[in-house]
Image (cartoon, rainbow, N blue to C red):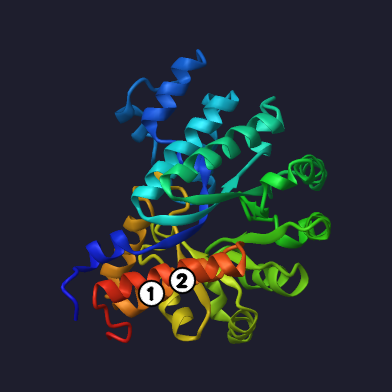
Amino acid sequence: MNNLDTRTFIKYLPKAELHLHIEGTLEPELQLKLAKRNHIQLKQSTVEEIKQTYHYHDLPSFLEVYYSALSVLQTEQDFYDLAFSYLTKAAQNNIRHAEIFFDPQAHTSRGIPFKTIVNGLYRAIVDARALNIDAGLIMCFLRDYSKESARKTLKEAINYKDKILGVGLDSDEHNNPPLKFVRQFEDAAAVGFHLTTHCDLDQKNSIEHIRQALELMDVERLDHGTNIVEDPDLVQLAAHRKIGITSCPHSNSLGNPVMKGKEVIELLNKGVKVSINSDDPAYFGGYINDSYNAIAQKFHLTKAQIIQLAKNSFETSWISQQAKTLYLKEIEKYISNNDIIEDDK
């Protein structure tokens, strides 16, 4: 056993983040700053008052709080500030690569031009390279909006294909299965976008939605998605196809007080490429190192398991094989420099 405690070990472990909503990084301090800048009158006037609104018991009640905060995002500089603030924290968490969700419909529906959103976020990504972190954008369709809205959003996104890695699907899953957007996903794949979709925890028809995503829509990752353990055939398929599953311990606690930790361990043991991510850290009390620490502590993860989670995050990212190899070598160097035994159980 090496002499690094688990928290310190996680802090300096190179990792990627693949499930992070940029709108979910809007900290109260920045929300107040942007409201003042844009002359927006919020119902709350202090950080404490904003945090007092963070009471949610399920996905719809969370989304109500989440979307109401977005009114402060108005200009390209606002989106830049939001993204650069997250990327600064990501670098402090030793995230080496991040793939960042954004929800354009949540903003275009308020009259914000698509280009304002993308250009602000992308400019922050470029500047953050100076922090020794690289990043890309994933445009998500809001699944509780219409298929026509998704079609129009994809049409706009294609104009910015050089700035967007892929497409995803998020928001309220109830009565909005993945198959609702099969045409939009086919069109996105046809122009070269990568594909992922949220398959939220313990939803009505969870397994059927996962089946649709994997068998009919050919997604490369499932976001959340740990309900897959309920179907051994789908678990085997995910392992065979090296599907990434992006688990988020803190937000998992919204509907599951044990963070789906047993499911994460089961997936690891079955060779599925599950990773750990922070989802909406401003709203659930922790960035990626906090997420790793939470599940590691509660489920007594070994360093070998933690290392595998980090390796999975790079292996299921949408970067070149050469870049993956370089990042995996960083992990190996970190292990070697600290005399960490990978099979430490």
Query: Is 303 left or right of 18, judged from the image as shown?
Result: left
Which amino acid type corresponds to the residue marked 2 in the rendered image?
A: Leu
Q: Nearer the viewer, residue 223 or 337?
A: 337
Whole-percent x and y of residue 3? Answer: 15, 73
Q: Secondary structure at mark 1?
A: helix
Q: Residue furthest toward the left?
A: 3
Point 40% across, 35% down: residue: 27
For residue 78, the mark is none
Which quadrant does the C terminus fall into?
A: bottom left
In the picture, residue 178 is in which quadrant?
bottom right
Q: Are marks 1 and 2 in contact (CB under 8 Å)?
A: yes
Q: CA distance from mark 1 to mark 2?
A: 6 Å
In the picture, residue 96 is in which quadrant?
bottom left
Point 65% across, 37% down: residue: 118
Whole-percent x and y of residue 9? Answer: 26, 66
Point 83% across, 44% down: residue: 148
Q: Secondary structure at mark 2?
A: helix
Q: How many marks?
A: 2
Location of residue 160 with respect to 134 vertically, above or below: above
Query: Is 151 left or right of 287, judged from the image as shown?
Result: right
Whole-percent x and y of residue 250? Answer: 38, 56
Residue 292 appearing in the image = yes
Point 34% across, 35% down: residue: 51
For residue 328, the mark is 2
Query: Is 5 left or right of 50, judged from the image as shown?
Result: left
Location of residue 91 with respect to 261 vertically, above or below: above
Q: Nearer the viewer, residue 240 or 236?
A: 240
Q: Nearer the viewer, residue 47 or 246?
A: 246
Which amino acid type corresponds to the residue marked 1 in the rendered image?
A: Glu
In the picture, residue 217 is in which quadrant?
bottom right
- Residue where numbered disc 1 is placed: 332
